Image (cartoon, grey):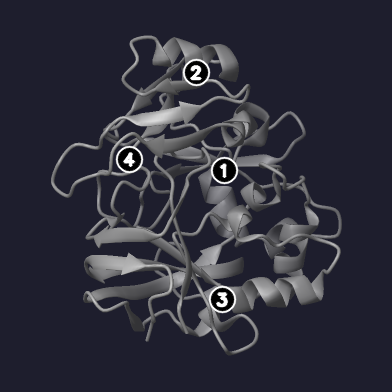
Amino acid sequence: MTIAALYRYPVKSMLGESLSRAVLDERGVLGDRAYAVLDVETGIVASAKVPKRWAKLLAFSAAFAGEPVAGEAAPPVVITFPDGSTRRSDDPDIDQALSDVLGREVELITTPPDGVAFEELWVDIEGVERAELGPEHIIEATTKRQEDTGEAISHFDVAGFAPPGRFYDLCAMHVITESTLQRLRELAPESDFDARRYRPNVVLSDTEPGFVENDWPGREMTLGGDGARLAFSFQTMRCVMTTMAQQDLPEDRNTLRTVAKNNRIDISHPVVGGKWACAGVYADVAAGGEVAVGDPHS
């Protein structure tokens, strides 16, 4: 059993980097979600989880101009725009360039403002009840506005269960196995369950079939030989973002429908407890270290 792939996303909701090696610190993969796009009008961090407003973020990609160093400010990122042009995060007109393409006044930021939040759409999918995606009481309690389709949009604090300083949705690390992706392919062979849809930090090979991560919360796992260790917290709830077009992957709501119909997990948690459509697992970094593709896990 080995690490099959490693990913880092320098700018929240943009496409990221496939890595051969990565450093884990107490806040996750070094440099992960170090930058975000802030909507100036609302003060909310832009997230492709609200597709009508921010789907175009997935047409951008970002890569660091130099490797991040622990304890230092994140280095500049090179952002590739949808037309293939590139700009750096330290270009004086980067905010205007992003605003022109996104159609809203935005700022590229590296420090989360106090109380900053992101939004998430509870998408309507044919054949799926909203309660099959997440607990109704949480959906109702967090809904702040509605899309013009009537679909609910929830409002969540950034990095609700992660160390502060980076722009995670909830937790510092997201792990998924090839076993889970293969099980989804078996359930819906007409859809493409590419790991990129799920934006993991770590993809693990696994010899066991099925949704193996379902049983991991409460356990720890060692990655590689440098002492890096993950503590698994709770299963990863899935959302509309997994269905969206990116690179060569088409929009496909069946990818979320398949998860909702086949892997609803009753998460035991004081804040987000309830039944969710899940694939993968969240984790905290119990011990930092360097890991590489091909390293064993145990």
Q: Give the x, y percent position of residue 226.
A: 22, 74
Asked whether residue 203 is in view, the answer is: yes
Measured in 3D between alpha carbons, the distance from the residue under mark 3 to the one under mark 2, in whole angstroms, is 40 Å
Q: What element carries label 3?
A: strand
Does 144 appear above or below 95? Answer: below
Q: Which amino acid does label 3 sit on?
A: Asp
Label 2 to label 4: alpha-carbon separation: 17 Å
Instruction: Give the spatial CA distance, label 1 vs label 3.
Output: 20 Å
* Amino acid on which disc 2 is placed: Leu
**Mark found first going from the N terminus, 2 or 4:** 4
Q: Which residue is drawn at 70% across and 77% down?
A: 183
Residue 105, x across and y down, in percent:
48, 13
Query: What kind of element bears circle 1?
Result: strand
The label nearer to you, 3 versus 4, is 4
How far apart in space, not on screen, are marks 4 and 1 (Cα)? Answer: 20 Å
Determine whether label 3 and label 2 are within 8 Å by CB.
Answer: no
- Where residue 266 is drawn, which disc sits there? 3
Q: Position of residue 253 (x, y in %)?
A: 78, 52
Q: Calculate the distance from the C-alpha at mark 3 to the C-alpha at mark 4.
A: 31 Å
On residue 120, the disc is 1
Q: Within the image, what quadrant is residue 37 found in?
A: top left
* Distance from the alpha carbon under mark 1 to that under mark 2: 21 Å
